Image: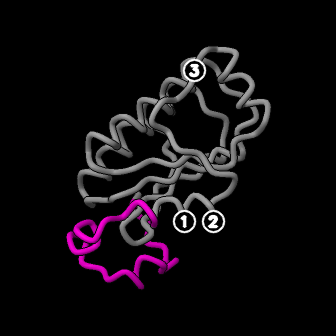
Amino acid sequence: MEHIPILRMGPFLLVTIQVDMHDQLAMTLQDDLTNRISETGAKGVLIDISSLEMVDSFIGRMIGNIAGMSRVLDANTVVVGMQPAVAITLVELGLSLKGVKTALNVEKGMELLRKSLTESDIEEVGLDREETRNHGLTVCH
């Protein structure tokens, strides 16, 4: 079974989609990501979709579902790298992705996630404010 790698960056999880998404892969990602959030106590999820050139309504809904499930598990979600054609398609399909924050690139997305951390989040994951700027990667998947 095909899986998309999920990397841990401090209190955040990073997902970089570098393959064509099909329905089963999207569902597997949803399951894997929600499990990782639960296991790690991650406070944020960054999903890089810069390699996706097209999405259909199912994939668009799955991105929205992932963000919703993450929110219920106490993690913010930021989607980065959206191609103009993908944005146009999502709007044309009527998918506004409510609750999904977006940023132009990974750097800006990580900045959004860092700013969303509360002091209690930082204490909960055992970091200080300076450590939240750490860019070291730990592979979770």
Three-letter code, disc 3: Leu
**Residue drawn at point x = 56 percent, y = 25 percent:** 96
Which residue is identified by label 1?
A: 111
Give the residue number, with chain letter if any, for mark 2.
107
Question: Percent from the top left, x then y, of residue 6?
Answer: 46, 55
Q: How many marks?
A: 3
Residue 57 at x, y percent in the picture? 59, 17
Residue 137 in the magenta stretch? The answer is yes
Q: Residue at x 45, y 36 (%)?
A: 99
Circles 3 and 1 in contact, beta carbons < 8 Å: no
Look at label 2 and name its amino acid: Glu
Q: Residue furthest top?
A: 93
Q: Please name the amino acid that badge 1 sits on.
A: Glu
Q: Residue 95 bears which disc, if any?
A: 3
Residue at image x 41%, y 60%? 116
Hey, which quadrant is residue 86 in on the image? top right
Q: Secondary structure at mark 1?
A: helix
Question: Does dot 3 land on a helix, a strand or a loop?
Answer: loop
Q: Which residues are magenta?
A: 115-140
Nearer-the-camera pick, 92 or 22? 92
State the residue in front, 13 or 121: 121
Q: Is residue 59 magenta?
A: no
Q: CA distance from mark 1 to mark 2?
A: 6 Å
The picture places residue 70, in percent across and down from the top left corner, at 34, 43
Q: CA distance from mark 3 to mark 2?
A: 25 Å
Residue at the image position 60 percent from the left and 15 percent from the top = 94
